[in-house]
Image: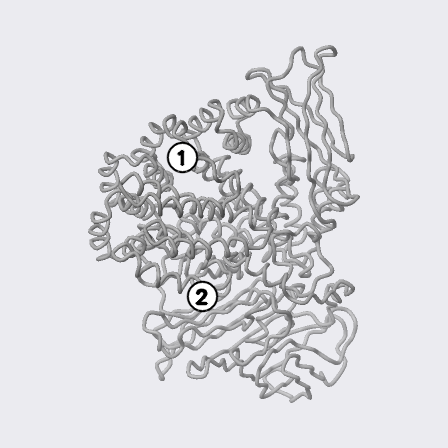
C-alpha cells in the first residue's frame, strides 16, 4: 500500500500534542498463532445500496494447523450473524456460537485433527458504516467496504463500491481469520445492477443476467493469498485492455478518462516484463487489473491481481504533458504482486518485507526507464522523506508498537528501501537480484519474516550478513558523519577523518568507497568506517583536486564535509553522479558572493538532468543583480526552449525578476502552451508586468476547465480585479484553516496577494498570519517548509520595490518592506 503523505506534518503535530500512553512499549507483538488455517473462501454477496449493507453467504474451508481443535474463532467486525452451520456435503448442521460484534467464536461440535479439513457456512449482513473502529487515533477509517454515493445524491460523483482490506478490515465485509500469515484461495459471486461492471481477484469466469435487472459475476482465484488482499470493485467504469504474454492487463477508469487510460497506466506491461526479469519470477498471477476509486482512504492498494488507486491517478491529457506524477505509484503497487502478495509478511512487525521492496521498486523502475539520474533522484527524495520524519528511534522490524497502523511509516517504507539500496551496492547487482529470486522461490505463497530474507542473501553470497541485519533491520537510527580532508606535503599522504556524531553509543559499520581525483583521473579505495573516529590515509604524489568519501553516494546518513568551493566545482565536473552534482549545486548556492559559485550554478542550468536544472534555478539569489546578469541568457533560453515543461515553467517565473517589458511577448505566447505549468506560470508572470492584460487572458482561459498550476493561477489573477476585497475574503479563509497541507498550499497564493495591497495595516496583518503559520509547523519539517514560505515573503518585498520604482508611495511601501524583513532570518534579508 502506498499511503498519501499530504498531512504528514499535521499528523506529527497532533501526535506530539496528545497525551502519550507508553504502556505498549512493554507489549511484545508476536506473530499470531495459527490454530486453524484457511484453505478456501467462497462468497455470495448482494449489495443494499439504500442502507449501505452487504448481504452475504460464506463457505469457509479450514483445517487445524497441527494440533486438534474443537473450536474456531473468526474475525467478523460489526456484522449481523444470521446462521452458522457445518457443511456435510450439501447438508448443513447448525453450530453453537458466540458473537461480541467483533469476534465470532464457533463450537465445531467435535475435535478435528491437524490437517483434517472442514467447511463452515455463515449467513450474515455486513454493515460497514456502523462499525465502531477499535484501536488508536491512527486508524481514522477502517470500514473495509465503502459505498460511494450509493443513492446517487451527489451529482458530480459516480456511484461506486470498493474495498480496502489492509490491515485487518476485510473482516468487516466477510468472516475470516484476518491475519497476514493466513492464505486462502477464493471464489466470489457478486450480484450488482446490470449497468455496472465488477472487478475482483483472479479471473472472471461467468456472468449471469437476472430477471430483476441485476447481474451475477463469478470471480475465481485459484492461487492462495492473504485475506487482506481480497478485493471487490463495482461501478460504471470504462475498461481498457492491454496484455502481457497472453495475460489480460486492464485499466478501469471513469468514462471521461477512457481516452487517456493508456497514457496513465500504459507502461504497466513493460513494468511487468521488467520486474519479471529482475526477480527471475515471471508474473505469477492470472491477470493484472488496476481500478480507480473515488474518496479512496489512502494512495493505492496492491490487492492481488486487482490494484486499487485513488481517483487522483486519473489525469487529463493536458495534465500529463507535465509528466505522469502517478507513475511511481503504479510501479510500487505492481511490485507488491511479488513482494507482499506472492510472498507476504507474516506479521505487521515485518511489514517492511512488503513495503521496502515496493518503495525501492520506484527507484528500480525510474533507473531502468529514465536513466540513473532519475533513479538516484527518486532514491534521494525517499531518503530525505525518512531523514525528515523524526523516526530515528524506531527499529525497521518492530515488535513493539502502539497500533499496527503505526508501522506504515517512513521507516518501513523509505528507510527500508534505502537499506536495500545499500545492500545492492555492497554485494553487487547480480548477487542482489539472484537473492531476490531465491527469497521469492523459497517462500512463494507463504508468509515470511526478515530472517528468511537474510538467509536468501547469505545463500547466494556465501557471506554472514547477521551484522547487516542486526544493524539495519533489528536496530534503529542512522549515522551522522563529520568528514574532514587534509593533505601532508611531507609524507605525500591524503587523509580522511570520519567521525560518527549521532547521539548514543551505537556505532555503525559502513563499507565505503573513497575516490581520489587528480584532474579527471580517479583512484578508488574501499574502506570500512566502524569506529567513533576513523582515519584513512592514501598515498598520492600531490594534493588531490578532490577526495570524495562515499564515492557512490550510497549511504543512508547525514553528512557534514569540509570541502572547499573549488573541490565542489571539481566534484560537479568529474565525479558525475546525481548526488555529486546536487551536493555541488547546494554548496554553490550558499556562496553566491563568489563568482565561481555563480558560474557553477549557471553551468548547472544546462545540466543533462532536468531535476538538477530546476534545482540550480531554484537556488539562484535573484535579488543580487550580479547573479541575475550572469544567468539571464540561460534563463531566457530555458524559458523558450527547454524540453521539460516543468523546467520551462520555472524559468518563466524567474524571468519576472528582470522586470523587462520585452519578456511580455514570451509570457503571452506561453499562456497558450499545452502544459498547465507553463501556461499558469506565464499568466502569473504576465500579471507582474501588465495586470489588465493578465485579467483579460484569465477571462479567456476560464472558459475551459483547468487543473493544477493553471487553475491556481486563474484564481490568483481573478483576485487582482479587486485586490482589497479578495484580500479580506482570503484572510478570513486563511485564518480559519487549521495547521494543514491545505493551509500550506494556500500560503503561496495568499502571500502573492499581499504584494498588491497598498494598506500597510493589512500588509502587516497578512504577514503576521503567514509567519504565525510558518512558526507553528513542527520543527522536524521546518527545513522543508521554511524555504518556501520565506521565499514567498521575499518575493513580496521584490514586488514592493518594483512598486516604488513605478511611482508608488515610497514611505509606506518602505515600512512594509522593513516589516517583512523583520520577520525573516538574517540570511534571508540579503539584497533588501
Residue 673: percent from left, percent from top: 26, 44
Residue 260: percent from left, percent from top: 33, 53
The answer to which quarter of the image holds residue 660 is top left
Q: As drawn, is 663 to the left or to the right of 190?
A: left
131 relative to 705, above or below = below
Q: Residue at x 51, y 57 (%)?
A: 4
For label 2, the crowd category at 10 Å Cα-Cα, with few meaning under 14, some 14 to 19 and many 20 or more, is few
Where, quadrant-wise, is the C terminus in this rendering? top left
The answer to which quarter of the image holds residue 483 is top right
Where, quadrant-wise, is the N terminus in this rendering? bottom right
The residue indicated by pointer 1 is: 622
For label 1, the crowd category at 10 Å Cα-Cα, with few meaning under 14, some 14 to 19 and many 20 or more, is many
**Which disc is residue 736 wearing?**
2
8 relative to 487, above or below = below
**Which disc is residue 189 wearing?**
none
Q: As drawn, is 212 to the left or to the right of 63?
A: left
Q: Residue at x 79, y 72 (%)?
A: 67
510 relative to 188, above or below = above
The answer to whether one can see residue 1 in this image is no
Front residue (pair 696, 702): 696
Front residue (pair 442, 391): 391
Q: Earlier in the sequence, mark 1 or mark 2?
A: 1
Q: As drawn, is 324 to the left or to the right of 396?
A: left
Amino acid at each position: 500500500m502506498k499511503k498519501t503523505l499530504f498531512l504528514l506534518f499535521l499528523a506529527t503535530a497532533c501526535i506530539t500534542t496528545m497525551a502519550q500512553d507508553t504502556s505498549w512499549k512493554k507489549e511484545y507483538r508476536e506473530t499470531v498463532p495459527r490454530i486453524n488455517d484457511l484453505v478456501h473462501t467462497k462468497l455470495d454477496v448482494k449489495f443494499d445500496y439504500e442502507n449501505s449493507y452487504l448481504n452475504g453467504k460464506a463457505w469457509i474451508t479450514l483445517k487445524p494447523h497441527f494440533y486438534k481443535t474443537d473450536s474456531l474463532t473468526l474475525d467478523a467486525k460489526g456484522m449481523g450473524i444470521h446462521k452458522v452451520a457445518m457443511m456435510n456435503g450439501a447438508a448443513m448442521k447448525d453450530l453453537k456460537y458466540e458473537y461480541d460484534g467483533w469476534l465470532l467464536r464457533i463450537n465445531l461440535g467435535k475435535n478435528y485433527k491437524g490437517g483434517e479439513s472442514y467447511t463452515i457456512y455463515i449467513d450474515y449482513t455486513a454493515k460497514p458504516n456502523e462499525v465502531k473502529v477499535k484501536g488508536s487515533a491512527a486508524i481514522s477509517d477502517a470500514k473495509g467496504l465503502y459505498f460511494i454515493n450509493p443513492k446517487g445524491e451527489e451529482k458530480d460523483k459516480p456511484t461506486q463500491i470498493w474495498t480496502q482490506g489492509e490491515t485487518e478490515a476485510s473482516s468487516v465485509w466477510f468472516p475470516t481469520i484476518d491475519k497476514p500469515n493466513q492464505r486462502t484461495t477464493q471464489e466470489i459471486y457478486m450480484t450488482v445492477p446490470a449497468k455496472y461492471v465488477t472487478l475482483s481477484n483472479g479471473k472472471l469466469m461467468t456472468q449471469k443476467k437476472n430477471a430483476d435487472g441485476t447481474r451475477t459475476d463469478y470471480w475465481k482465484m485459484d492461487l492462495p493469498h492473504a485475506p487482506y488482499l481480497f478485493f471487490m470493485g463495482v461501478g460504471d467504469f470504462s475498461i481498457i485492455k492491454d496484455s502481457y504474454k497472453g495475460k489480460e492487463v486492464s485499466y478501469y477508469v471513469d468514462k471521461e478518462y477512457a481516452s487517456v487510460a493508456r497514457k496513465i497506466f500504459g507502461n504497466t506491461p513493460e513494468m511487468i516484463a521488467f520486474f519479471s526479469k529482475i526477480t527471475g519470477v515471471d508474473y505469477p498471477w492470472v491477470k493484472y487489473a488496476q481500478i480507480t476509486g473515488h474518496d479512496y482512504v489512502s494512495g493505492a492498494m496492491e490487492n492481488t491481481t486487482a490494484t486499487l488507486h485513488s481517483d487522483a491517478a486519473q489525469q487529463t491529457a493536458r495534465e500529463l504533458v507535465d509528466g505522469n506524477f502517478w507513475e511511481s505509484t503504479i510501479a510500487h503497487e505492481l511490485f507488491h504482486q511479488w513482494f507482499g502478495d506472492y510472498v507476504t509478511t507474516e506479521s505487521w512487525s515485518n511489514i517492511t518485507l512488503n513495503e521496502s521492496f515496493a518503495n525501492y521498486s520506484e527507484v528500480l523502475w525510474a533507473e531502468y526507464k529514465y536513466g540513473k539520474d532519475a533513479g538516484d533522484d527518486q532514491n534521494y527524495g525517499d531518503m530525505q522523506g525518512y531523514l525528515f520524519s523524526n523516526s530515528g528511534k524506531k527499529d525497521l522490524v518492530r515488535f513493539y508498537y502502539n497500533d499496527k497502523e503505526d508501522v506504515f511509516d517512513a521507516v518501513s517504507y523509505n528507510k527500508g528501501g534505502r537499506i536495500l539500496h545499500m545492500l545492492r551496492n555492497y554485494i553487487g547487482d547480480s548477487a542482489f537480484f539472484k537473492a531476490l529470486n531465491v527469497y521469492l522461490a523459497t517462500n512463494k505463497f507463504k508468509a515470511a519474516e526478515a530472517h528468511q530474507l537474510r538467509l536468501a542473501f547469505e545463500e547466494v553470497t556465501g557471506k554472514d550478513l547477521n551484522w547487516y541485519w542486526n544493524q539495519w533491520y533489528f536496530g534503529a537510527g542512522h549515522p551522522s558523519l563529520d568528514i574532514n580532508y587534509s593533505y601532508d606535503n611531507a609524507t605525500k599522504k591524503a587523509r580522511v577523518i570520519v567521525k560518527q556524531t549521532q547521539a548514543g553509543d551505537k556505532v555503525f559499520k559502513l563499507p565505503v568507497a573513497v575516490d581520489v581525483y587528480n584532474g579527471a583521473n580517479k583512484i578508488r579505495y574501499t574502506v570500512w568506517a566502524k569506529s567513533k573516529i576513523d582515519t584513512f590515509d592514501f598515498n598520492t604524489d600531490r594534493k588531490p583536486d578532490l577526495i570524495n568519501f562515499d564515492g557512490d553516494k550510497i549511504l543512508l546518513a547525514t553528512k557534514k564535509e569540509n570541502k572547499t568551493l573549488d573541490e565542489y566545482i571539481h566534484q560537479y565536473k568529474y565525479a558525475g553522479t546525481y548526488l555529486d552534482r546536487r551536493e555541488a549545486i547546494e554548496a554553490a548556492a550558499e556562496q553566491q558572493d563568489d563568482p565561481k559559485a555563480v558560474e557553477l550554478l549557471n553551468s548547472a542550468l544546462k545540466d543533462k538532468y532536468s531535476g538538477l536544472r530546476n534545482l540550480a534555478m531554484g537556488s539562484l539569489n535573484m535579488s543580487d543583480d550580479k547573479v541575475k546578469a550572469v544567468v539571464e541568457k540561460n534563463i531566457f533560453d530555458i524559458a523558450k526552449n527547454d524540453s521539460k515543461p516543468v523546467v520551462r515553467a520555472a524559468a518563466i517565473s524567474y524571468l519576472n525578476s528582470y522586470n523587462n517589458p520585452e519578456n511580455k511577448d514570451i509570457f503571452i505566447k506561453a499562456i497558450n502552451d499545452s502544459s498547465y505549468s507553463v501556461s499558469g506560470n506565464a499568466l502569473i508572470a504576465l500579471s507582474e508586468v501588465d495586470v489588465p492584460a493578465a485579467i483579460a487572458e484569465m477571462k479567456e482561459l476560464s472558459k475551459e476547465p483547468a487543473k493544477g498550476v493553471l487553475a491556481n493561477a486563474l484564481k490568483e489573477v481573478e483576485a487582482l480585479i479587486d485586490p482589497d476585497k479578495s484580500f479580506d475574503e482570503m484572510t478570513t479563509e486563511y485564518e480559519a484553516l487549521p495547521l494543514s497541507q491545505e493551509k500550506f498550499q494556500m500560503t503561496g497564493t495568499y502571500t502573492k496577494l499581499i504584494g498588491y495591497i497598498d494598506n500597510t495595516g493589512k500588509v502587516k496583518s497578512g504577514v503576521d498570519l503567514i509567519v504565525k503559520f510558518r512558526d507553528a509547523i513542527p520543527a522536524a519539517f521546518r527545513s522543508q517548509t521554511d524555504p518556501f514560505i520565506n521565499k514567498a515573503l521575499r518575493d513580496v518585498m521584490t514586488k514592493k520595490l518594483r512598486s516604488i520604482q513605478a511611482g508608488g508611495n515610497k514611505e509606506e511601501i518602505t515600512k512594509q518592506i522593513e516589516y517583512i524583513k523583520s520577520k525573516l532570518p538574517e540570511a534571508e534579508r540579503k539584497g533588501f
